[in-house]
Image (cartoon, rainbow, N blue to C red):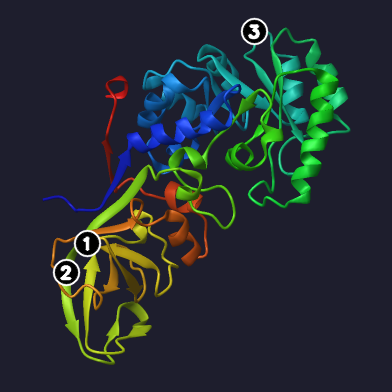
């Protein structure tokens, strides 16, 4: 029997989430962000399931785009960081990918490239202060790219849209609006938080990421408050139950002692699977659908949980680390991180099982 640690990927939940997105943006085109292996969910399976409902996909790099093409995905694919080396351009063109242009170095290469180019998304730094051309330098960049016989669009990224009171977001929207009015190009600004919380960011294209996978992009909220459903349920089983006396220590460093005589459950999940090593005592875990606290330190292959609240628990009983019944946002908050990191951090040794798969993606 194989190790029982699994990430169950529920495509019915994915369909629910794309339906929610369409309710928010009934007139916009949808570019589904499937970078980082679709945030740990499996890019090929997710893209196949989404293909009938979206107009394009977005990934980080050419390598990720090639994986989608090999899986049979024919929709446009945007490379969010553009090209890293001019040698990539022939393959980018051959594969029909679109590129984000964000640096003078990329512009210089493109102006001297002799082959027909894919669509260009000109990235403007409206306040994120990461990649992109400044608002002040955009006229020069636009003029340099105008000589190229290629479709151009405007692109920017929101820095603080997860905070619905963010003044920075209001400023970014105002800057981007002026640019759209000036250049009269198709435009994209809204990420997941923009889709849910900032209707004035929607423009022509939206780029849902984390909300596709059933996690909330808005601070202080969880998915179900936005009618989103978790696509991934990370699950395992109890592989052993031990009885320890009051004062006995559990796990590495003897950092936790039993406050009373205690049943301790050992679960087949650890940081080598992507469970956060820094998750503290008290992080919630579901055993037979009931909440129990993590105790002791997370190790490479196992965690330990206090079973006093589920005295009937037995070896082989099911355990949910996050997903159905336990919001990934809650686990992330307990561990001092974000849902994005937990979902995308699931490692390759965790078997992914796809359920509720429509015929189109099976």
Which residue is depicted at the point 67% across and 35% down? Answer: 199
Q: Callout 2: 10 Å neighbours few (<14), some, many (20+)?
A: some
Which residue is depicted at the point 52% across and 48% down? Answer: 216
* Residue placed furthest toward the bottom: 247
Above or below, 172 against 48 in this view is below
Q: Nearer the viewer, residue 89 or 1?
A: 1
Say the numbered circle drawn on residue 288: 1
* Residue placed furthest toward the left: 1
Which residue is depicted at the point 45% across and 24% down? Answer: 66
Which residue is depicted at the point 45% across and 68% down? Answer: 278
Residue 128 occupies quadrant: top right
Q: CA distance from mark 1 to mark 2?
A: 7 Å
Asked which secondary structure carries label 3, the reply is loop
Q: Which residue is mark 3?
A: 116
Above or below, 280 against 83 in this view is below
Place of residue 118 in the rendered image (x, y in percent of width and height, measured from the top left): 62, 14
Q: Is residue 129 visible?
A: no
- Dot placed on the residue nearer the N-terminal end, 1 or 2: 1
Say the numbered circle drawn on residue 313: 2
Q: CA distance from mark 1 to mark 3?
A: 58 Å
Place of residue 8 in the rendered image (x, y in percent of width and height, measured from the top left): 29, 44
Q: Relative to 245, is 13 on the left or the right?
A: right
- Dot placed on the residue nearer the N-terminal end, 1 or 3: 3
Q: Relative to 303, is 130 on the left or the right?
A: right
């Amino acid at each position: 029997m194989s190790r029982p640690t699994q990430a169950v990927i529920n495509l019915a939940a994915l369909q629910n989430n794309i339906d929610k997105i369409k309710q928010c943006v009934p007139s916009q085109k949808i570019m589904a962000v499937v970078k980082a292996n679709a945030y740990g969910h499996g890019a090929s399976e997710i893209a196949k399931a989404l293909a009938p409902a979206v107009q394009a996909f977005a990934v980080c790099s050419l390598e990720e785009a090639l994986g989608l093409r090999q899986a049979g995905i024919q929709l446009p694919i945007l490379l969010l960081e553009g090209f890293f080396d001019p040698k990539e351009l022939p393959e980018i063109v051959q594969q029909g990918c679109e590129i984000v242009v964000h640096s003078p170095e990329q512009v210089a290469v493109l102006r001297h490239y002799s082959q027909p180019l894919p669509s260009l998304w000109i990235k403007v730094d409206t306040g994120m202060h990461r990649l992109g051309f400044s608002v002040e330098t955009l006229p020069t960049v636009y003029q340099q790219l105008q000589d190229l016989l290629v479709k151009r669009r405007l692109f920017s990224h929101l820095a603080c849209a997860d905070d619905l009171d963010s003044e920075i977001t209001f400023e970014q929207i105002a800057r981007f609006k002026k640019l759209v009015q000036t250049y009269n190009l198709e435009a994209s600004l809204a990420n997941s938080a923009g889709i849910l919380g900032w209707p004035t960011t929607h423009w022509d294209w939206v780029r849902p990421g984390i909300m596709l996978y059933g996690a909330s992009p808005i601070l202080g909220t969880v998915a179900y408050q936005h009618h989103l459903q978790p696509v991934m349920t990370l699950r395992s089983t109890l592989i052993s139950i031990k009885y320890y006396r009051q004062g006995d220590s559990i796990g590495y460093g003897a950092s936790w002692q039993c406050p009373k005589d205690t049943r301790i459950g050992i679960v087949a999940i650890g940081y080598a699977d992507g469970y956060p090593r820094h998750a503290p005592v008290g992080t919630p875990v579901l055993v037979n659908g009931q909440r129990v606290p993590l105790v002791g330190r997370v190790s490479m292959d196992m965690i330990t949980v206090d079973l006093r609240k589920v005295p009937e628990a037995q070896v082989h009983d099911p355990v949910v680390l996050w997903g159905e019944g336990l919001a990934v946002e809650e686990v992330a908050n307990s561990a001092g991180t974000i849902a994005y990191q937990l979902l995308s951090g699931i490692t390759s040794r965790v078997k992914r099982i796809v359920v509720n798969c429509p015929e189109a993606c099976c």
